[in-house]
């Protein structure tokens, strides 16, 4: 791919998970971040930029996916052929950097800026940027300090460190955040943590929220919703939750809220589309949730479904009476934004960035998932009162579309890139 040197040619780096032109969402480490990176890269290309989205080549993946004249997914092999979870990716970063720089120099490819995602890619991106002498902009997506201090509810310190390797992560995050040219935080809360716990200068942080596909996620008329409910086997008072099988998603907390919900709305039901991969982690996670539901006597009020195919996702949102996001920790919560854009009232966690932006009772509801009775009562309140539900549907969709369309997010991001490139040019 020949790059035009006048158009801010961008090297985007996102290493973990199954990054592809058509990503296999629901596979390990393949969720909101992959969607975020792909959608931004697509909008950059629409806006005339040449973009290489650099990721890891493993299993039987091809070297590249050409998505359009301006955009390709470019895979570099390292760490062997098997899947590597994101917590262990940094063990192989040096090989990735060496292989990437070798290929870039062999092909004579030129980039004006690097944009990396998550700390594994951030560590690699910083080294590559220093070698190529170009600016490096980084989006953390999640922060080790926050995760370490908010995820350990049911986990001992030693087990948590073994699983997540926080000590090493936080140390390397600090170096990335100090050395890169600019940080794009997705929430105000994230920016505050970067300043307070990673000593980042306020002048080197810009807050730009994630975006969503405003063409794909849109509301439908109530008559159409009824048809979708029949098609996908939803009932009038069904609550939807969906996503990867992960401790921080708080599905167990949602199940604990169901006795309160059922007491107030007896015909309410939970549609739980969680996990979906045929892996030990997903199977054991769902099994533990099923056991909890049996112990609480609400197993007959939950319908378990596989991970929702991407082509059905918007209709699942539309068919639900309420969307629930009970996360212990959620840097932002794109699934809730997508649901709101589809006109579905959302009950979100107070533990994340989206909480800071919504207006309670106007465009969304919120509650503390660590307080099951509170979360259950808010879910019930949203179902019980049609006037409230209708207002949340209309205003939630307006809020999501106006604030989180991807093209607007991409333009804001490109403005940051331009400033960094201009600043470096003036320093030379």
Image (spheres, helix red, strand yellow):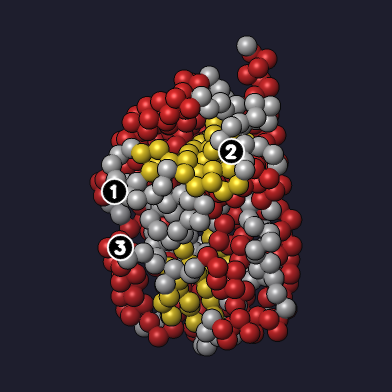
Q: Secondary structure at mark 2?
A: strand
Assign a secondary structure to mark 1.
loop
Residue 251 visible from this viewpoint: yes
Q: Position of residue 191 (x, y in %)?
A: 57, 38
Please name the residue shown 49% across and 68% down the image.
Answer: 309
Question: In terms of depth relative to the viewer, which is nearer, 247 or 39?
Answer: 39
Instruction: Tell me if residue 21 comes above or below residue 315 in the rendering.
Output: above
Residue behind mark 3: 279
Q: Residue at x 33, y 31 (%)?
A: 95
User: Considering the image in quadrants, where does the N terminus appear?
Assistant: top right
Q: Residue furthest top?
A: 428
| Residue matched to label 2 | 51
**Secondary element at tag 3:** loop
- Disc 3 versus disc 1: nearer the observer: 1
Tell me if residue 23 comes above or below residue 306 in the rendering.
above
Task: Using the image, tell me which numbered label, if any, was put on residue 82.
Answer: 1
How would you rate the neighbour count of disc 3 (Cα within 10 Å): few for under 14, some for 14-19, many for 20 or more? few
Q: Along the horizontal axis of the image, is 19 left or right of 236?
A: left
Mark 3 or 2, which is nearer the eye? 2
Q: Nearer the viewer, residue 191 or 284?
A: 284
Quadrant of the rendered image containing residue 229: bottom right
Closest to the observer, 260 or 40: 40
Image quarter (top left, top right, bottom left or bottom right) of the C terminus: top right
Q: Label 2: how many residues lie within 10 Å, few (<14), some (14-19) or many (20+)?
A: many
Instruction: Please report whichever mark, 2 or 1, sits nearer to the chain's N-terminal start.
Output: 2
Q: Is residue 143 visible?
A: no
Q: Which of the marked residues, 3 or 1, is nearer the chain's N terminus?
A: 1
Q: CA distance from mark 2 to mark 1?
A: 27 Å
């Amino acid at each position: 791919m020949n790059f035009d040197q006048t158009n801010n040619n961008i090297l985007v780096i996102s290493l973990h998970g199954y990054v592809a032109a058509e990503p296999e969402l629901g596979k390990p480490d393949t969720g909101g971040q992959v969607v975020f990176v792909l959608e931004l890269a697509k909008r950059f290309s629409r806006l005339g930029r040449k973009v290489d989205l650099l990721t890891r080549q493993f299993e039987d993946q091809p070297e590249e996916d050409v998505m359009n004249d301006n955009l390709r997914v470019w895979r570099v092999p390292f760490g062997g052929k098997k899947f590597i979870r994101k917590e262990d990716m940094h063990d192989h970063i040096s090989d990735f950097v060496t292989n990437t720089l070798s290929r870039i120099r062999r092909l004579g490819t030129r980039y004006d800026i690097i944009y990396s995602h998550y700390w594994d890619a951030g560590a690699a991106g910083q080294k590559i940027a220093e070698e190529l002498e170009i600016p490096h902009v980084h989006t953390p997506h999640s922060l080790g300090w926050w995760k370490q201090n908010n995820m350990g509810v049911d986990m001992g310190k030693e087990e948590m460190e073994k699983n997540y390797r926080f000590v090493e992560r936080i140390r390397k995050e600090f170096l990335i955040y100090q050395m890169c040219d600019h940080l794009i935080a997705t929430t105000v809360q994230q920016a505050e943590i970067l300043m307070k716990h990673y000593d980042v200068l306020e002048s080197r942080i810009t807050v730009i929220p994630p975006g969503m596909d405003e063409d794909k996620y849109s509301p439908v008329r109530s008559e159409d919703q009824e048809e979708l409910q029949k098609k996908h086997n939803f009932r009038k008072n069904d609550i939807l939750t969906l996503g990867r099988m992960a401790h921080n998603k708080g599905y167990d907390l949602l199940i604990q809220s169901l006795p309160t919900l059922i007491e107030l709305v007896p015909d309410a039901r939970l549609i739980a589309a969680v996990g979906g991969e045929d892996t030990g982690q997903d199977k054991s996670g769902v099994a533990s949730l099923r056991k909890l539901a049996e112990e609480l006597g609400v197993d007959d009020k939950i319908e378990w479904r596989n991970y929702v195919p991407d082509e059905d996702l918007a209709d699942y949102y539309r068919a639900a009476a309420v969307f629930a996001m009970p996360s212990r920790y959620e840097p932002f919560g794109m699934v809730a934004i997508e649901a709101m854009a589809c006109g579905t009232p959302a009950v979100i966690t107070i533990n994340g960035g989206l909480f800071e932006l919504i207006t309670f009772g106007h465009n969304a509801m919120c509650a503390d998932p660590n307080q099951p009775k509170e979360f259950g009562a808010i879910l019930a309140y949203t179902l019980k009162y049609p006037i409230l539900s209708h207002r949340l549907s209309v205003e939630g969709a307006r809020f999501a579309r106006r604030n989180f369309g991807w093209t607007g997010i991409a333009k804001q991001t490109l403005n940051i890139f331009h400033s960094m490139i201009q600043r470096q040019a003036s320093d030379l």
